[in-house]
Amino acid sequence: MLPEDVSSTDDLDEMITRIGLQGLEDGGRRGPFLVVGLGNPGLEYVWTPHNAGFMAIDRIAEQEGVVVQNRRCRATTATCRIAGREVILAKPETFMNLSGAAVAALVREYEADPAKDLLVIYDELDFALGTFKIRERGSPAGHNGARSVTSALGSEEWLRLRIGVGQDLPPEAKDAGARRPGRDYLLSPMRKADLTGLDEVLDRVAAATRRIIQDGPGPAMNEFNRKDV
């Protein structure tokens, strides 16, 4: 039975089309896009390589004129709009190895699809300082924070942006797992020269994040991924 204001199936098709177009005009009623940077809370970790993800979130927040200070889902958060879409910036307060608990809580809270509505930013010891790479899926590759996210989400299908923090390190320092030198480097304050190099890449990371939100990961990878990392 047709609705009272519809006299034919052609009119019904037209109504469905109008409703669909309106939904697109309204942004498809999508929920917010989640951008989560991984790191460790606490003043002693602020300028360490392992907190590159936190630094990226702070840089994006600064450029968008917001402060990451609200507490929600075991993370500090801020809300802004990028490319017309609501964006949640978040820094988990769970410490790196339990980052997945906060990420999963945010995904549930905002009913996000991890494969489409989530970007996780974190440090990568195997990439040179001053570089970064966007990847749509993959294994944690020895990063405990990424491993926690994958475990909590039950999937490797989530977008990640890895910021290089390695520079002139001996081979043993590039092992962030069992060997102590890698852990010591990641959790020690960075040298002033290294902080300058990281500061320069954070602006590009922020630009890449905006491109992801506006156009999707494909165009962002084409523009920003470096072939030498």
Image: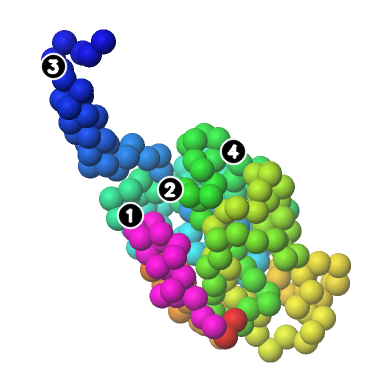
Task: Give how far apart the Cα atoms at labels 1 and 4 are.
Answer: 22 Å
Locate residue 29: give its quadrant.
top left
Along the line of sight, which residue is nearer the eye, 21 or 112? Answer: 21
Secondary structure of the residue carrying tag 1 is strand
Q: Are marks 2 and 3 in contact (CB under 8 Å)?
A: no
**Three-letter amino acid code at disc 1?**
Ile
Kindly report the distance in space between the C-alpha atoms of the residues bearing marks 3 and 1: 42 Å
What residue would you read off at disc 3?
7
Quadrant where the C terminus sits is bottom right
N-terminal-most mark, 2 or 1: 2
Amino acid type indicated by mark 3 = Ser
Which amino acid, mark 4? Ala
Which residue is tagged 1?
Answer: 82
Which one is closest to the eye, mark 2 or mark 3? Answer: 3
Secondary structure beneath label 4: helix
Q: Are marks 2 and 1 in contact (CB under 8 Å)?
A: yes
Alpha carbon distance from label 2 to label 3? 41 Å
Q: Is residue 95 visible?
A: no
The numbered mark, 3 or 1, whose residue comes first in the sequence reads 3
Q: Could you say which is closer to the camera, residue 122 or residue 23? A: 23
Q: Residue furthest front?
A: 9
- Separation (CA) of disc 2 from disc 4: 14 Å
Task: Indicate which disc residue 33 carries.
Answer: 2
- Amino acid type at image mark 2: Phe
* Contact (Cβ within 8 Å) of mark 4 with mark 3: no
Residue beneath label 4, please? 105
For the point 37% across and 40% down, which residue is it?
A: 30
Q: Nearer the viewer, mark 4 or mark 3?
A: 3
Q: Is residue 31 magenta?
A: no
